[in-house]
């Protein structure tokens, strides 16, 4: 059985509730999402996951340079 990063993150965030991530990804695809704390940690990981499922992201963070680095990573 192989686990993707998205699945493992989901189990970490929802240890009892096991959501259907494919259905969640379909519902979020092409939506605009505002994500705070996007420059470090879980916020950074979530912004990469949401970018992979083609969400339009509005990223907010306290560190402008780190946020610009993430913007470059997501645009490649």
Image: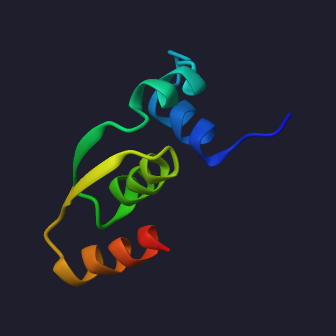
Q: Give the residue furthest to the top.
A: 17
- Could you tell me which residue is drawn at 62 percent across and 47 percent down? 5
Residue 63 or residue 11, whichever sits in front? 63
Residue drawn at (45%, 33%) of the image? 13
Residue 43: percent from the left, percent from the top?
33, 54
Q: Position of residue 45 (x, y in %)?
A: 44, 56
> Which color scheme did the rendering employ for the protein?
rainbow
Name the residue located 50 percent from the left edge and 74 percent from the top edge. Answer: 76
Number of numbered discs: 0
Identify which residue, 29 or 7, lies in the foreground.
29
The percent position of residue 48, horizontal first and vertical second, equals 46, 57
Asked whether, in this view, residue 67 is left or right of residue 21, the answer is left
Determine the residue positioned at 59% across, 26% down. 22
Question: Is 64 above or below relative to 42?
Answer: below
Q: Residue furthest right?
A: 1
Asked if residue 12 is positioned above or below residue 34 in the image, the reply reads above
In the rendering, at what x and y percent does residue 26 appear?
Answer: 50, 27
Q: Residue furthest bottom?
A: 65
| Front position in the image: 17 or 44 | 44
In the orientation shown, which residue stands out farthest toward the left? 62
Q: Is residue 14 left or right of residue 65?
A: right
In the image, taking residue 57 as reference, residue 16 lies left or right, namely right
Question: Which of the image's four quarters has the N terminus?
Answer: top right
Q: Is residue 28 left or right of residue 5?
A: left
């Amino acid at each position: 059985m192989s686990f993707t990063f998205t699945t493992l993150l989901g189990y970490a965030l929802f240890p009892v509730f096991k959501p259907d991530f494919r259905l969640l990804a379909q519902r979020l695809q092409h939506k605009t999402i505002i994500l705070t704390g996007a420059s470090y940690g879980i916020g950074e990981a979530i912004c990469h996951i949401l970018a992979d499922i083609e969400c339009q992201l509005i990223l907010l963070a306290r560190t402008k340079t780190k946020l610009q680095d993430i913007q470059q990573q997501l645009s490649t």
